[in-house]
């Protein structure tokens, strides 16, 4: 570089730094400026040799990130310094975290350390490792939420300056942004940044679509401005009469949200009706804030008819992101729907700056902040080692973007839950213990099933019982990450307990067959029954799937010399290591397909277009000539089938028949006497792994008859139960229907 070019660059760096101090949202004290200056000097030194892909000096990147943190997000001097230093430890040998702590103190060092941890996660990898990385990144949320906020700012600047990158890299980074960073920004209340991230994500993942919509927005801008002006003029006069201090702004909806509407509603750009929103921002003291919002509402609705279904009152109950506003959709001039957002200046700052402004306005005596509550909840899910990373990230994403409903506890406390949450989710949101012991729920005074979907305004009362415990069906009823992870852990524990019982039963049964239960015999049994781990074996013995005749077959095959020779060869090939014996996985031995809500077994064919294999997510399709054909859910033809022939689609899933539960009906008859019903129900309920679904008893002139619907794991268990029932005094006949 020539001397002149170096001078020019240095002048640009100085200018960028000065601008950073100028645009800060917070008023910076002298000490603040000192701290930021030192951070800038260290960053300048650490990155002096580095250049970005575009050729410019690397230092422009940390300054730009610090600028986003200072201006757009409005964080304090500590965060601005941390943003300037965010790549220092990673990119320079001369500085360690200890050096940063010595120079800038513990807080800055902690934030920089969190950011360094995230950056050192490996790039370019398969989805499960990538998900594992997201999970690790989210773990830093608990260190200091500023880590994630600066990371989002870093990502925004990278997205803004991605033109010099290879096309495949651009698509990867943009997809990642849409997948996790935009939802995160949304959750922390950074709506402007979320919008930028989404638009930039679309720019690189679907450039044609992005450019097309951008071009159309520019084309219609003039006409749109005119419309906003005429709309504003009508209400201005009335607002002025009320002596209000306000500004009216019109803003186009983001490219990403217009694209989403086009996709969801199957319409063209011209048919998207609310392509812009009008925002009325008013000045108010805290006392009159709510009153003035509704006053403005009444002025707007005096002139324009509101859509009653589209009223959103986030002033009375703010979103869990801290967002407050009143949204109404009204019928504007020329028969067009217009969204009007009414916010005070305070609310507007919270909407634009999210977390930072929220803390500026938070009163010292205020209750725990919803963001903190959310981070604590998230922490629970993150630290649960039983849930795999991909599932976790999927669940986490659902919780990030989900719309909210507000429900009441019996004492009138307000709880926010994601849309689609059930009464079981509500139970777990109160407390894990309440969730685990849930027996039922009352919604608005009426008893409802655990799968009942809650709606805003419901009052929910959870009924608990000491004997209640989670079962596999609960996973179908729970939608929130918290509830699902707790249920999965409980089911796993249950399996382990059954496995421990099974181990003892197996020890006894093998003793009778003159076989000792040890590592090698367990190894042989696991191989003989084609299982994966010892827990699979013990669990199946515990629930009775592996019974006496099967163990006798094993013993005789073991004694057969020829078999023994073949077995040894197999054992050698697939010998199970010691650590695998203790693995707590219960194999998904997907060996049968069930259809519909009742999970019936029906005849089917696998389709050729997507060749599903056991374990895939599938559905059944009722054909005209070939009966049920099974397709993968992501089959190329799935969308067209589901849209054109929804009535022929049957839910289907692969199950492990040894772990599946079946409905069986038994009929009992005999001579009636006092206490007979008690004897029958006692035996059924004391029998492990059998649940009563319904029962119906009748007594006619001393003759007793009854019908009982049971849920059982398999035939062996049912036969054992029938034998026990036959032994009851007075019972004459017990048969299965």
Image: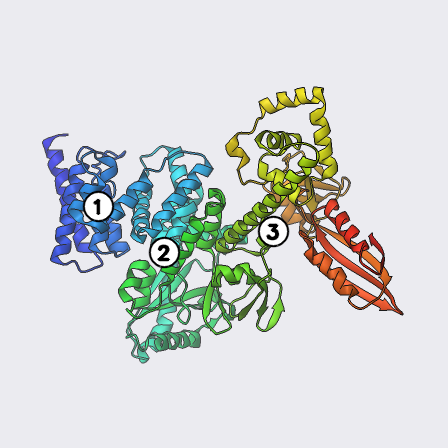
Callout 1 secondary element:
helix
400 is higher (above) or lower (below) than 288: above
Whether residue 359 sits left or right of residue 270 in the image: it is left
Identity of the residue drawn at 11% across and 57% down: 30
Real-space Cα distance between discs 1 and 3? 50 Å
Give whichever of 415, 494 is nearer the camera.
494
Q: Which residue is disc 3 drawn over?
A: 472
Residue 632 at least partly seen: yes
Identity of the residue drawn at 54% across and 58% down: 436
Percent across and percent down for residue 260 are 48, 51
503 is higher (above) or lower (below) than 298: above
Callout 3 secondary element:
loop
Q: Residues within 10 Å of mark 2 (few under 14, many from 20)?
A: many
- Asked which quadrant contains residue 468, the reply is bottom right
Q: Earlier in the sequence, mark 2 or mark 3?
A: 2
Percent across and percent down for residue 324 are 37, 66
Q: Which residue is disc 2 drawn over?
A: 188
Residues at circles 2 and 1 in contact by the CB criterion of under 8 Å: no
Q: Which residue is disc 1 drawn over?
A: 84
Identity of the residue drawn at 22% across and 44% down: 85
The outermost residue toward the right is: 701
Give whichever of 491, 425 is nearer the camera.
491
- Asked which quadrant contains residue 313, the reply is bottom left
């Amino acid at each position: 570089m020539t001397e002149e070019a170096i001078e020019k660059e240095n002048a640009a760096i100085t200018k960028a730094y000065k601008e950073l101090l100028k645009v800060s949202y917070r008023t910076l004290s002298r000490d603040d400026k000192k701290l930021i200056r030192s951070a800038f000097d260290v960053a300048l030194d650490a990155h002096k040799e580095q250049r970005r892909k575009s050729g410019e000096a690397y230092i422009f990147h940390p300054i730009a990130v610090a600028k986003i943190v200072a201006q757009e997000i409005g964080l304090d001097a500590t965060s601005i310094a941390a943003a300037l230093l965010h790549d220092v430890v990673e990119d320079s040998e001369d500085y360690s975290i200890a050096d940063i702590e010595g120079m800038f103190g513990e807080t800055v060092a902690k934030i920089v350390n969190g950011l360094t941890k995230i950056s050192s996660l490996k790039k370019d990898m398969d989805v499960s490792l990538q998900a594992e990385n997201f999970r690790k990144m989210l773990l830093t949320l608990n260190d200091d939420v500023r880590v994630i906020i600066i990371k989002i700012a870093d990502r925004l600047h990278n997205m803004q300056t991605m033109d010099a990158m290879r096309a495949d890299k651009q698509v990867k980074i943009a997809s990642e942004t849409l997948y996790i960073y935009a939802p995160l920004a949304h959750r922390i209340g950074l709506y402007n940044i979320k919008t930028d991230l989404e638009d930039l994500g679309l720019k690189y993942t679907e450039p044609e679509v992005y450019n097309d919509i951008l071009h159309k927005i520019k084309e219609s801008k003039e006409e749109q401005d005119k419309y906003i002006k005429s709309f504003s003029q009508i209400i201005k006069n009335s607002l002025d009469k009320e002596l209000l201090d306000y500004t009216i702004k019109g803003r186009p909806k983001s490219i990403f949200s217009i694209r989403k509407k086009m996709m969801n509603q199957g319409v063209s750009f011209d048919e998207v009706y609310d392509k812009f929103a009008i925002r009325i921002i008013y000045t108010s003291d805290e006392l009159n804030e709510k009153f003035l919002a509704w006053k403005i509402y009444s002025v707007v609705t005096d002139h324009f008819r509101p859509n009653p279904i589209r009223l959103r009152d986030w002033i009375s109950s703010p979103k869990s992101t801290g967002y407050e506003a009143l949204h109404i959709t009204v019928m504007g001039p020329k028969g067009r729907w217009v969204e009007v957002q009414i916010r005070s200046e305070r609310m507007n700052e919270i909407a634009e700056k999210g977390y930072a402004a929220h803390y500026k306005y938070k009163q010292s005596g205020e209750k725990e902040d919803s963001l903190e509550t959310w981070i604590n909840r998230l922490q629970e899910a993150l630290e649960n080692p039983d849930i795999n990373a991909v599932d976790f990230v999927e669940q986490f994403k659902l919780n990030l973007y989900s719309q909210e409903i507000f429900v009441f506890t019996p004492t009138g406390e307000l709880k926010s839950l994601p849309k689609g949450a059930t009464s079981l989710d509500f139970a777990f949101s109160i407390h894990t213990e309440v969730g685990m012991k849930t027996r039922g729920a009352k919604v608005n005074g009426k008893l409802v099933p655990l799968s009942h979907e809650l709606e805003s305004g419901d009052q929910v009362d959870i009924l608990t019982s000491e004997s209640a415990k989670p079962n596999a069906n609960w996973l179908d009823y729970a939608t929130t990450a918290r509830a699902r992870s707790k249920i999965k852990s409980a089911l796993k524990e249950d399996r382990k307990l059954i496995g421990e019982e099974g181990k003892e039963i197996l020890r006894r049964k093998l003793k009778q067959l003159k076989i000792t239960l040890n590592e090698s015999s367990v190894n042989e049994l696991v191989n003989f029954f084609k299982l994966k781990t010892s827990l699979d074996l013990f669990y199946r013995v515990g629930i009775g799937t592996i019974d006496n005749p099967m163990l006798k077959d094993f013993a005789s095959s073991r004694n057969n010399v020829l078999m023994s020779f073949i077995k040894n060869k197999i054992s050698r090939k697939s010998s199970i290591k010691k650590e695998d014996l203790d693995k707590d996985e219960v194999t998904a031995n997907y060996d049968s397909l069930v259809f519909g809500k009742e999970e019936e077994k029906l005849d089917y064919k696998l389709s050729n277009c997507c060749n599903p294999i056991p374990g895939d997510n599938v559905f059944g399709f009722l054909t005209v000539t070939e009966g049920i054909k099974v397709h993968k859910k992501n089959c190329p033809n799935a969308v067209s089938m589901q849209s054109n022939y929804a009535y022929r689609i049957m839910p289907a899933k692969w199950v492990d028949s040894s772990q599946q539960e079946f409905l069986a009906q038994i009929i009992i008859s005999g001579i009636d006497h006092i206490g007979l019903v008690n004897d029958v129900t006692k035996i059924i309920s004391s029998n492990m792994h059998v649940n009563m679904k319904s029962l119906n008893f009748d007594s006619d002139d001393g003759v007793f008859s009854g019908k009982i619907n049971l849920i059982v794991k398999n035939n062996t268990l049912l036969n054992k139960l029938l034998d026990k029932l036959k032994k009851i005094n007075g019972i004459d006949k017990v048969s299965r229907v």
